[in-house]
Image (cartoon, grey):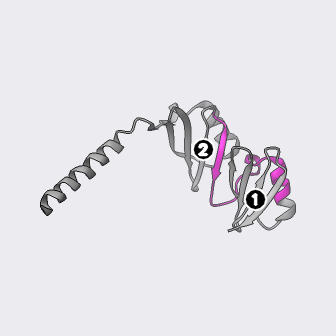
């Protein structure tokens, strides 16, 4: 009886694993350099000129397309379906040109010894993280909302 239960358990786990592998709601494709949309390569050139693109992935999830661009120096960029930047994750100082001016001005004034390592566009606000683990939220126009420390 135990062996039948074990066999059935293994069969069900295998069946479930196979089903998850065939999920048609999500699809990832690694892009060649020539397949990366020009708007994205232009953004990289304008704001991250010293960096090289190590990998580019086009993801379609539930019909929504997004792009993940992995740059040298451990920088990851995310773009939406209209090629607008939505997320920048880094470990070092992000280029000033990649940060909205009002946010950059606020951080420079209030945290002169720190710098921005991450920026994200949320549904109704923007968020940045500094090298000292301080996270801040700003309106879509760049007005300060709040700060929190990890």
Q: CA distance from mark 1 to mark 2?
A: 19 Å
Quarter of the N terminus within the rendering: bottom left
Where is 36 relative to 122, above or below? above
User: Which numbered disc, 1 or 2, marks the residue that appears first in the sequence?
Assistant: 2
Location of residue 10 by image quarter: bottom left
Looking at the rendering, the stretch of residues picked out in magenta corresponds to 83-107
> Which disc, if any, is residue 57?
none
Task: Please name the residue that numbered disc 2 is placed on.
Answer: 78
Q: Dot 1 corresponds to which residue? A: 136
Question: Tag count in the figure?
Answer: 2
Does residue 91 appear left or right of residue 3 in this picture? right
Q: Are marks 1 and 2 in contact (CB under 8 Å)?
A: no
Q: Is residue 9 left or right of residue 96?
A: left
Q: Residue at x 79, y 59 (%)?
A: 146
Residue 64, percent across and down?
55, 34
- 44 within the magenta span: no
User: Based on the displayed image, in which of its 4 quarters is residue 130 positioned?
Assistant: bottom right
- Label 1 SS: strand
Pair 1/2: label in front: 1
Please tell me which residue is depicted at 66% across the width and 47% down the height of the picture.
48
Quadrant of the rendering where the C terminus is positioned: bottom right
Above or below: residue 71 compared with residue 59: below
């Amino acid at each position: 009886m135990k062996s039948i239960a074990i066999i059935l358990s293994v069969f069900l786990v295998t069946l479930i694993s196979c089903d998850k592998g065939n999920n048609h709601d999500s699809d990832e494709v690694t892009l060649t350099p020539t397949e990366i949309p020009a708007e994205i390569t232009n953004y990289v050139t304008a704001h991250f000129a010293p960096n090289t693109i190590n990998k580019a992935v086009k993801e379609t999830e539930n019909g929504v397309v997004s792009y993940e661009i992995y740059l040298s120096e451990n920088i990851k960029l995310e773009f939406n379906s209209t090629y607008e930047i939505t997320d920048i994750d880094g470990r070092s100082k992000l280029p000033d040109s990649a940060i909205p001016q009002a946010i950059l001005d606020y951080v420079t004034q209030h945290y002169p010894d720190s710098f921005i390592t991450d920026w994200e566009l949320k549904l109704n606000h923007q968020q940045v993280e500094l090298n000292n683990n301080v996270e801040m939220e700003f309106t879509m126009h760049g007005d300060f909302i709040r700060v929190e420390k990890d």
